[in-house]
Image (cartoon, rainbow, N blue to C red):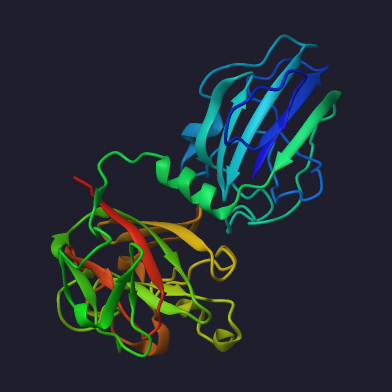
Amino acid sequence: MEISNCGSTTKRSPLPIVASTCAARPRSKYGIPPKLLGNGNSVPIKDQAVFGTTRRAPPCKDPIVLADRPLGEWNQLHIIQVGARTSVWLNDQLVVDHAIMENFWDRKRPLSSSGPIQLQTHGGEIRWRNIWVREIPAKEANELLASKNPEGFQSIFNGKDFTGWRGAVSEYEIEDGSLYCKKGRGNGEVLYTDGSYDDFVVRLMFQLPPAGNNGLAIRYPGEGGAWNDGMCELQILDSEHPKYRDLDVRQYHGSAYGMVPAVRGYLRPQGEWNFQEATVEGPTIKVELDGSIILETDLSEVTETMGGHEHPGRLRSAGHFGFAGHDDPVKFCDISIKELK
């Protein structure tokens, strides 16, 4: 979502919210808290008065620079919201850069993926004018997410052939720069990289067919199952399909399969491309889906598993990255890895 408001609008291409505000209260070192009335299709967002990160990552609780104008003058806000990722320009200066906005209403969940935009004050008079909103389509949102902090990422899939990959190569196909498991094939066989990784961040895009199912093999040893012999399998699943209504919570999209459940409700509509990033450091894993953190866990602390199944590989310190199969043509593209050293 993009919001703008202000007396003098500026052109800044893909920013979504513009608005002008005029405060009749003492200057705040924080930027302007937004809420908003859309023009037709308003995008979901619920904001706090102060933009920031989660409690565990407080560096962005204060603005990068102080850019608010003197009391009584109009200020211009420009906000881009992609998932829980928030960027704010105040009077043409970047004051919040791609920070995670905390869910004020439910600290255990990411910011809601949809909802109203609200205007907020704290008892003093604040005036708003020239409020505009634009919904950001999935393709543009994915490009925005992929453009942030690209340093150190290396492509591991060339979009043409399986150079650099081994394992279930015969069970996969490549089409238009994407790889996918052949329908009715795979049977849990793992397609995995030649390279082995210890701590790393992986970025990719995926597209789910109806009831689509696959998984990301993390620190896979090269044999056995991704979900138990590897560190884990991060589930890739069309979670809201009726076929999966009765699954264990540890089987839905983004979960460390059979061990730790991810938060549901953040996938794009079936058939759209999603952008996902997984960070693996020591025994910890963090999964960010379309700008929202849906899993953050330490597998060394897991004491209960689905069905009591053993996961002997969960404390592996290194292994291959790959895809777990499962017979469905889930498409993957733009796959890159950054090693953490």
Inspect this view and state whether residue 113 appears: yes
Q: Residue at x 43, y 80 (%)?
A: 213
- Front-lying residue, 107 or 178: 178
**Which quadrant holds the C terminus?**
top left
Question: Quadrant of residue 152 in the image?
Answer: top left
Image x and y of residue 321, in percent? 23, 66
Residues 263 and 172: in front is: 172
In this rendering, the answer to whether 183 lies above or below 31 is below
Residue at 65% over, 56% down: 112
Vertical placement of 72 versus 292: above or below?
A: above
Residue 54 percent location from the top left of the image? 53, 45
Of all residues, the one furthest to the top in this rendering is 70
Which residue is located at x 58 percent, y 58 percent? 108
Image point (59%, 85%), residue name: 245
Q: Quadrant of the N terminus?
A: top right
Tell which of 198 and 303 is nearer to you: 198
Q: Give the percent coordinates (x, y) of residue 18.
A: 70, 31
